Amino acid sequence: MEQGSFDQDESIWRQETQRRFLFYSHDACGLGHTRRNLAVATALTKLAPDVAILMATGSNDIFQFRRPQGVAVLKLPGLCKLENESYVARGLAVSAADILELRSALLKAAVKSFRPNVLLADKHPLGVKKELRPALEALRASGGRAALGLRDILDERSTVLKEWYAHDLYDKIEHYYDRVLIYGHRNVFNPCGEYDFTKAIAERTRFCGYVLNHKEREQPAKDPSPPFPFKPRGRPVVLATAGGGEDGFTLLKAFIAAATKATWHGVVVTGPLVPENQRRTLQLLAAEVGVTFHTFVSGLDRWFDFADAIVCMGGYNTLAETVSKGAPAVCVPRISPRTEQLIRAKAFSRLGLVVCVEPKDLKPETLGQQIVVALQKSRQQLRACAKACLDFRGAERAALNLLELAKSRNASVSKKELAVT
């Protein structure tokens, strides 16, 4: 039997017997990309328990989260983001060019051997420095489909337009992607208009709502989470979190200072990516003033149910999980290297869901005053406001879109195309 014929028979057999999905996230900064993909993957396995999902990620912390049956990890060598468009290898003594070439080869090999029906890429249409492009080419040749998942806000308009035009991303998205999934709401922020989506891209765009990492999605893989410190000495508990932790030092230091002699008890969770010297400094400061300190809590969103107020940055996952629970929140967004957190925080503030403190105004006194304001807010009213303004079924809607794409996979692939892969 000719190789092309064998490949074609095998491809059709796989399509008919099992739907396969490859999820890609570059993960050079923070945990947001991986956590969104994990939430969508979990929702997908609930809707279709027989699916096979391979998560390609550069994050080491993926192994700290429980993954459902049917989900496996392709660990890519890690990257570290220095600034926009600038990356270096994380933990491997090789050049940036070599690490990207290795990652690209792994992604292409995954498509050729795993043969996914659908590839889902988080945020980067072509991956970091176009590392995903060979995999996308192999996917098209095998008849697979592709979806691009975008958080609600990417950055300010001028920055996104500059980047997309410089890399010809409008044409590339039209060429490689069958669907664009927006993890947000048109009435909060409309990227179709804000980022000048072409007519073809806009027609492929679906607004899914906000993606949440529910309690059952992030059970600890090994040890259980530490118990939540319930109202020590009867004081309200305020939880401060910096997401992944790479750039939360200034906020957490101000929070610990604000907690000194406060009428509330402070709890700090730095995030697993906090630099070691900063972690030690924060831990010593917290010990001096009696603030409870943790580096990482698996399934941290479960603590949002118990905290009387939250202090956080404006990252997608943290902010969505906070407002979905109606937790009173003070948000101090990051403004560099991107301003997307500031734009999101202001949008949520206009809806009455959070209190926004801009980084230029961050002082322990100011932060402490806003925490007192947040503690006076009603969780029930905030939850009702969030429910009225937003939809939090983004993972489920994204999963339904992926299943729809899997059904539409082109089964009539020519032998010539398959031979290319």
Image (cartoon, helix red, strand yellow):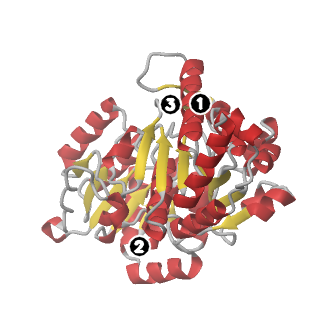
**Viewer-closest of 39 and 282:** 39
- Please tell me whether mark 3 or mark 1 is closer to you in this view: 1
Helix, strand or loop under label 2: loop
Per the model, the C-alpha gap separating discs 2 and 3 is 33 Å
Query: In the rendered image, is residue 122 in sight?
Result: no
Q: From what the image shows, is residue 43 above or below residue 377?
A: above
Q: Nearer the viewer, residue 416 or 103?
A: 416
In the foreground, 246 or 405: 405
What residue is shown at x 33% (from left), y 34% (from top)?
Answer: 278
Name of the residue lying farthest toward the right: 199
Q: Horizontal and vertical percent for residue 239?
A: 32, 59
Q: Where is residue 7 in the image (x, y as percent from the top left)?
A: 63, 41
Q: Quadrant of the N terminus?
A: top right
**In the visual, does 59 lie left or right of 269?**
right
Residue type of the residue flagged with mark 3:
Leu
Q: Which of marks 3 and 1 is nearer the N terminus?
A: 3
Mark identifier at residue 238? none
Tag in front: 2 or 3: 3
Q: Seen from this angle, which residue lies furthest left?
A: 233
Q: Which amino acid does label 2 sit on?
A: Lys
Q: Mark 2 points at which residue?
A: 325
Q: Mark 3 points at which residue?
A: 79
**Residue 104 got which mark?**
1
Q: How crowded is mark 2: few (under 14 residues within 10 Å), some or many (20 or more)?
A: many
Upstream in sequence: badge 2 or badge 3: 3
- Report the Cα–Cα distance between label 3 and label 1: 13 Å
Tell me if residue 182 can be seen: yes
Find residue 347 and report its horizontal and vertical position in percent: 62, 65
